[in-house]
Amino acid sequence: MEGGLSSFWGPVTSPEWCEKNYVHSSYIAEFFNTISNVPGILLALIGLINALRQRFEKRFSVLHISNMILAIGSMLYHATLQRMQQQGDETPMVWEMLLYFYILYSPDWHYRSTMPTFLFIYGAGFAVVHALFRFGIGFKVHYVVLCLLCIPRMYKYYIYTNDVSAKRLAKLYVVTLFLGSMCWLSDRVFCEEISHWYFNPQGHALWHVLMGFNSYFANTFLMFCRAQQRGWDPKVVYFMRLFPYVKIQKPKSQ
């Protein structure tokens, strides 16, 4: 414990990151890793409001809500460093990827009831198994595989989209994913060296911030692509010329 502070949550029972524990509060183990999830919650809330206001399909509302749940789970994990809260962070990560898989692949799936049924059973089964066993590196490999399965479809959407602003969203998604991954790896691999620096760059906290934007760019791009599939004449517009969101014009029959 730093500065004589004691832990409100008891001994650490989950993996720690490259941030000294309980420096700023006895209630928050990793302060920066905790508060860095706030931008992700706010961005998901903005996406949810836009999806509801323009009556997008419910899948996108669920996706934005899942982003918020994931960020809240991450906050609880880093604030407590307890195994139960760690599972509350990692299980929603898998659920979120299953949602992305459904949104990406369901438009061309001929048997529409089979995919959501399978994904629901898979997600529920994973939650039960993950609650009973520690995976460690196995969880990370599993999560990366789910991400890789989504990339071909994301790329297909990109090459079939002619709108320059929508393509820019996809590029921002790739850039934030790359930068966030570099921050995550640096924090994990070079932690021993970083711990001797006068200033900790808080790579894992930067990962949280960048992934909050990454999810928002991905969601907005997918909303554009889906609106294009439905013939809703989507456009990427900017709030105060900085913040992108999708504006649609549904036919009167819809």
Image (cartoon, grey):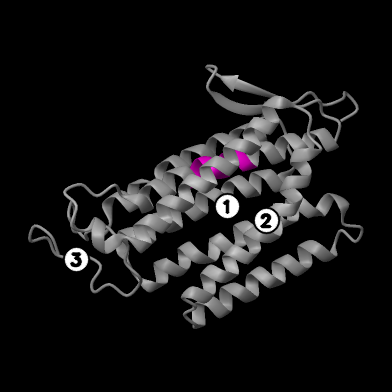
- Tell me where residue 126 appears, x and y as whole percent: 61, 74
Q: Which of 66 and 176 lies nearest the eye of the viewer?
A: 176
Give the vertical position of 38 relative to 249 (above or below). below
User: Is the residue 206 above or below the residue 47 in the image?
Assistant: below
Query: Can you tell which quarter of the image residue 128 is in?
Result: bottom right
Alpha-carbon span between mark 2 and mark 1: 9 Å
Where residue 184 appears, as percent x and y from the top left, is 42, 55
Query: According to the image, label 1 marks what residue?
Result: 66
Left or right, 121 with respect to 229, comes to left
Position of the N terminus by quadrant = bottom left
| SS at circle 1 | helix
Q: Would you say 2 lies left or right of 90 here?
A: left
Residue span colored magenta: 211-218
Secondary structure, magenta segment, majority class: helix
Residue 44 position, x and y percent, is 54, 41
Residue 43 is situated, as x and y percent measured from the top left of the image, at: 51, 38
* Residue 46 within the magenta-colored segment of the rendering: no
> Contact (CB < 8 A) between labels 2 and 1?
yes
Q: Which residue is mark 3?
A: 7
**Mark with earlier residue (3, 1):** 3
Q: Earlier in the sequence, mark 3 or mark 2?
A: 3
Q: Residues within 10 Å of mark 3 (few under 14, many from 20)?
A: some
> Which residue, given by chain and number where applicable, does mark 2 sit on?
99
Q: Is residue 122 above or below residue 41?
A: below
